[in-house]
Image (cartoon, grey):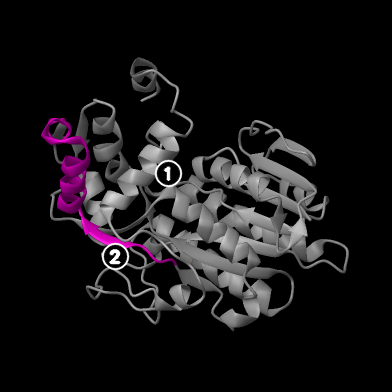
Amino acid sequence: MKILIIGAAGMLGQKLTRALIAKRTLCETSISGLMLADVVAPKEPHFDGSVESSAADLSQPGVAEALISRRPDVIFHLAAVVSGEAEADFEKGYRVNLDGTRALFEAIRNAPAPYCPKVVFTSSIVVFGSPLPDVISDDQCLTPQTSYGTQKAMCELLLADYSRRGILDGIGIRLPTITIRPGVPNKAASGFFSSILREPLIGLPANLPVEKTVRHWFASPRAAVSFLVHAAELDTARLGTRRTLTMPGLAASVEDQIAALGRYAGGGAVDLISQERDEDVARIISGWPRSFDARRAQDLGFKAENSFDEIIRVHVEDELAGGAQADMPIADMRKRL
């Protein structure tokens, strides 16, 4: 079993890599090799099998073909220009998110037969845009209101068509907003959902750029990794022609987040949150979905958290108490942020 992770240098890519190394098998088959690719070469982890790390931009000619020439059995496609950046840079968003994905699928199509790898594609709940019902069902039409959402919706259609034709065996997972993201903020419009918890938990100030009444759909990084692994092991015959699933999550308001922070870390942590409205961020998220009925994914075995108290606990366990930041002095953590 050879596994390719595209976007392996990112937060989820690194966590997925560690999870697969710890698991040692996928689809009841021993993992013999890991191929890690991103625009910046990922660090090579310690692994008993073979590890290849490379700098790779799928939107550049020949890059996808070079990756597919190793004939990985399972491909996790996590790489993307995130929401805020895709909205600010129209050309880059389409080049990376749409053209890069199409290049990957075409490289698979043109590989010497027989070859039909499992492809796990990370989509997003922002393929749905206003007007929306309060709770979105699995039958909701895709109506993206951002360039990022449009690019992801297009890729979902490509995944379904290439799967229908037997070129690849694809499954798409629409991720909730992943919170609490460790490390430094990225350019995602949703980044504040993490920062208003992450920074106060280590004594740093954070800004809230929207109203506390804003409601959204969340899951932890730990849940996101479990989604990816479960998707790779799922029999896609159970999906029929609808190859992309909305992942389970937690519907919560910013006020709910802050209340959970107060219960865990006290009023002093809450007092570190200021409120200065950012019109660009507020505009982007105004059309985003608030809650889902994700029973199709749940019936297929996908699971997420049930409260923000649980999401905070997961962050503390994985990043502060027992994870990457566990032995890092507070002063050093502040420097990272």
User: Against 69, is 293 above or below?
Assistant: below
Specify whether 123 is left or right of 266.
right
In the image, residue 248 lies in the stretch drawn in magenta: yes
Question: Residue sitting at 24 percent across and 25 percent down?
Answer: 203
Residue carrying label 1: 89
Give the secondary structure at mark 1. loop
Q: Residue 128 sits in which quadrant?
A: bottom left
Specify whether 75 is left or right of 92.
right
Dot placed on the residue nearer the N-terminal end, 1 or 2: 1
Amino acid identity at mark 1: Asp
Quadrant of the frame with the N terminus: bottom right
Residue 332, x across and y down, in percent: 39, 17
User: Against 286, is 279 above or below?
Assistant: above
Question: Residue sitting at 13 percent across and 49 percent down?
Answer: 211
Q: Is residue 205 visible?
A: yes
Q: In this rendered view, identify the residue nearer to me: 133 or 265.
A: 265
The span shown in magenta is 247-272
Specify whether 311 is left or right of 232.
left
Q: Is residue 209 visible?
A: no
Question: What secondary structure characterizes most of the magenta part?
Answer: helix
